[in-house]
């Protein structure tokens, strides 16, 4: 019975592969593949759940595949099935099934018809993998798939400016949550001295034993989990990304940002609840965050002029209440609330195009004056202040930019000395000296040896920040990301000597994808020398579709997406950072996150957006 868990991953995987092989013109066949994939998954999940729970079902933990193993480290794909998994799998399969039916007609004759169904099946695979995950490593694989499929769906109308711009913005905010997951994984390695499975978290004695002498480590892990959950579920102060994600097709907005993806913060809290539920301060923080988000999101929703934005903020408000329910220990109520909210928001978004016309007709024929509302009892100044703040969305977008991204941009712009010439004259020789020093590290004084990993990691971070703000040369921005990976590998080698196999796992994907991406950029530069920098969007995907696809794969590989061994190598990197080296862990995680943003931004500016050449049709700015 346990082995049947694999079918929930195999079915979406097979559906995705089949859809990739079907030609663009075969709309009926494409939609049928997605339809039957989601339908069979739904029937399988329903049958598995009914059989399991009718026979006194107990939670199942399945250690499936060991991808990498050494004396001190093991990367294992682990699956876990319990009531949380069953609820999310059932809801996800049912709603995906409905979306495939709706999209079959809604997107008829769209240029990206095949691309849409490919991405929906890719999302469904990531959804099932995340929900079934039995440890942080497996969860992070699905988490990354959700992030990139989100980017692709928001930028579905890739010939328009706003969808592409908002896709990059949402992906950037998502990466903040990835910092939380990475640092939580790093601290968990040191707390448990193993890749802990979620099933072991239900052993209360084991959790208490490990936390009793490491209280602050436990609080740190819980806070990182909360940050990841808040970002993914659009809680304060990250709420403003959700309405901007509505630039995609209505059907993708329904399944992603109305129902499933936006509830993954809830899933993360529920899955890790046995770990943090005894930490009163963390529970208070989760509940407070949920209440504040519910209040602020409700106020913002009431002044929105777009129906999609109203639904988005209404969903955020309900998820804030679910956060409060989880903090109070009402996990069963939270699951019921999730199913209800997901179903309602899916329905509202799918009927929103029709509802607009209905409301216009109602206003015309059945006008009613405004009724008395609660805000009318407030003092005028307070009422106007709340209205203004709600219209401005409480400046949440400005806050995130001012506190996080703008300082990083300022630092990146100060690094003007990092030119291509200086990289060859100074940085590469410096790296060669570092490699020589590593092989002679026994002769280095201990107090200097302790600082070298932090210095090298910081140098790598400066490359990423420079790449993030680079505007002139896409090739140079790409080269800086590759250099960051090289310096990270060298830094950790000084910190705790890597074996050759570990270095190979980490750098193999980096070098292959880095070389491939640089070759594509150089080829495109020769073809389009007049339209090749990072000052605007160029839309080269329309004249060079094959280069765009291959370059996207190179981007994913260089960013550590789970298509190369680099993904495992990055987890290896963090497993070699000591418990007291928070600064080193922070530099590495920040470089990893900003590197991914820089890469996606580079891809979007070179290949997406309105085509720069005037003989192409100019689309509307927004969808």
Image (cartoon, rainbow, N blue to C red):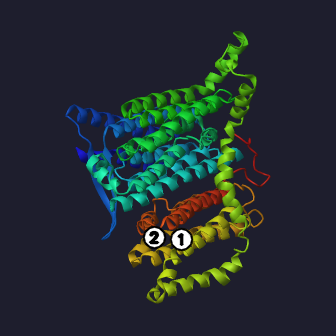
The Cα–Cα distance between marks 2 and 1, rounded to whole angstroms, is 9 Å
Q: In percent of the image, x 57 and y 32: which residue is there?
A: 106
Q: In percent of the image, x 32 and y 69: which residue is there?
A: 72
Asked whether residue 509 appears in the rendered view, the answer is yes
Residue 136, how many percent across, how many down? 39, 54
Instruction: Say which residue label 2 marks.
Output: 506
Q: Report whether 230 appears left or right of 83.
A: right
Instruction: Determine whether the residue tagged by mark 1 lies in a helix, strand or loop.
Output: helix
Q: Nearer the viewer, residue 615 or 191?
A: 191
Considering only vertical position in the picture, is 616 above or below 283?
Answer: below
Asked if the residue under mark 1 is in contact with the one under mark 2, i.e. CB atoms within 8 Å, the reply is yes
Count residues near mark 1 (Cα–Cα under 10 Å), then give few for <14, some for 14-19, many for 20+. Answer: many
Q: Report whether 461 appears left or right of 563.
A: right
Q: In percent of the image, x 47 and y 58: which residue is there?
A: 183
Residue 485's disc number: 1
Q: Nearer the viewer, residue 411 or 595?
A: 411
Q: Nearer the viewer, residue 104 or 193?
A: 193
Residue 158's disc number: none
Q: Earlier in the sequence, mark 2 or mark 1?
A: 1
Asked whether residue 22 appears in the rendered view, the answer is no
Instruction: Determine whether the residue tagged by mark 2 lies in a helix, strand or loop.
Output: helix
Q: Quadrant of residue 370?
A: top right
Residue 156, how many percent across, how many down? 61, 45
Residue 275, how many percent across, how many down? 36, 47
Considering only vertical position in the picture, is 242 above or below 616?
Answer: above
Locate the N terminus by quadrant: top left
């Amino acid at each position: 019975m346990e082995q049947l868990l694999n079918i929930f991953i195999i079915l979406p995987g097979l559906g995705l592969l089949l859809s990739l092989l079907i030609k663009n013109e075969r709309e009926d066949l494409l939609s049928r593949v997605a339809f039957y994939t989601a339908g069979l998954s739904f029937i399988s999940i329903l049958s598995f759940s009914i059989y399991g729970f009718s026979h006194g079902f107990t939670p199942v933990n399945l250690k499936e595949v060991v991808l990498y193993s050494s004396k001190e480290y093991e990367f294992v794909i682990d699956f876990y099935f319990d009531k949380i998994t069953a609820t999310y799998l059932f809801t996800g399969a049912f709603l995906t099934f409905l979306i495939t039916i709706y999209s079959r007609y809604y997107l008829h004759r769209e240029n990206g018809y095949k691309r849409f169904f490919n991405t929906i099946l890719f999302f469904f695979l990531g959804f099932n993998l995340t929900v079934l995950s039995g440890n942080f490593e497996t969860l992070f694989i699905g988490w990354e798939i959700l992030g990139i499929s989100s980017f692709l769906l928001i930028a579905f109308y890739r010939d328009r400016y706003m969808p592409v711009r908002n896709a990059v913005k949402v992906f950037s905010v998502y990466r903040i949550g990835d910092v939380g997951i990475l640092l939580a994984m790093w601290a968990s390695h040191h707390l448990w001295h193993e890749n802990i499975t979620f099933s072991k978290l239900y052993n209360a004695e084991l959790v208490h034993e490990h936390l009793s002498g490491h209280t602050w480590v436990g609080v740190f892990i819980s806070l990182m989990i909360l940050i990841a959950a808040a970002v993914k579920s659009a809680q304060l102060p990250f709420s403003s990304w959700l309405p901007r994600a509505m630039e995609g097709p209505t059907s993708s907005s329904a399944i992603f940002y109305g129902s499933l993806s936006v509830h993954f913060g809830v899933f993360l809290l529920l899955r890790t609840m046995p770990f943090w539920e005894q930490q009163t301060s963390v529970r208070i923080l989760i509940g407070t965050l949920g209440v504040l988000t519910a209040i602020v999101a409700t106020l913002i929703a009431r002044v929105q002029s777009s129906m999609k934005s109203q639904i988005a903020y209404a969903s955020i408000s309900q998820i804030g209440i679910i956060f409060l329910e989880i903090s109070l220990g009402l996990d069963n109520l939270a699951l019921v609330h999730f199913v209800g909210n997901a179903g309602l928001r899916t329905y509202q978004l799918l009927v929103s195009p029709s509802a607009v016309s209905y409301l216009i007709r109602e206003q015309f024929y059945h006008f009613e004056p405004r009724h008395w509302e609660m805000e009318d009892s407030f003092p005028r100044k307070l009422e106007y202040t709340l209205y203004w703040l709600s219209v401005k969305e409480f400046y949440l977008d400005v806050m995130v930019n001012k506190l996080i991204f703008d300082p990083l941009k300022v630092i990146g712009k100060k690094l003007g000395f990092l030119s291509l010439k200086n990289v060859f004259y100074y940085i590469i020789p410096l790296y060669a000296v570092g490699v020589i020093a590593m092989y002679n590290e026994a002769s280095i004084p201990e107090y200097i040896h302790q600082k070298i990993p932090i210095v090298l990691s910081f140098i790598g971070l400066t490359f990423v920040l420079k790449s993030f703000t680079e505007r002139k040369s896409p090739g140079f921005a790409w080269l800086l990301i590759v250099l960051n990976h090289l310096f990270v590998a060298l830094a950790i080698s000084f910190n705790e000597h890597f074996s050759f196999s570990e270095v190979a796992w980490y750098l193999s994907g980096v070098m292959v994808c880095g070389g491939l991406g640089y070759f594509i950029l150089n080829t495109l530069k020769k073809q389009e020398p007049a339209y090749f920098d990072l000052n605007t969007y160029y839309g080269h995907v329309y004249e060079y579709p094959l280069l765009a696809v291959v370059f996207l794969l190179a981007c994913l590989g260089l960013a550590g997406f789970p298509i190369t061994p680099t993904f495992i190598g990055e987890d290896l990197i963090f497993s070699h950072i000591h418990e007291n080296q928070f600064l080193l862990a922070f530099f590495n995680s920040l470089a990893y996150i900003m590197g991914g943003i820089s890469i996606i931004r580079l891809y979007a500016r070179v290949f997406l957006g309105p085509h720069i050449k005037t003989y192409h049709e100019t689309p509307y700015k927004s969808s």
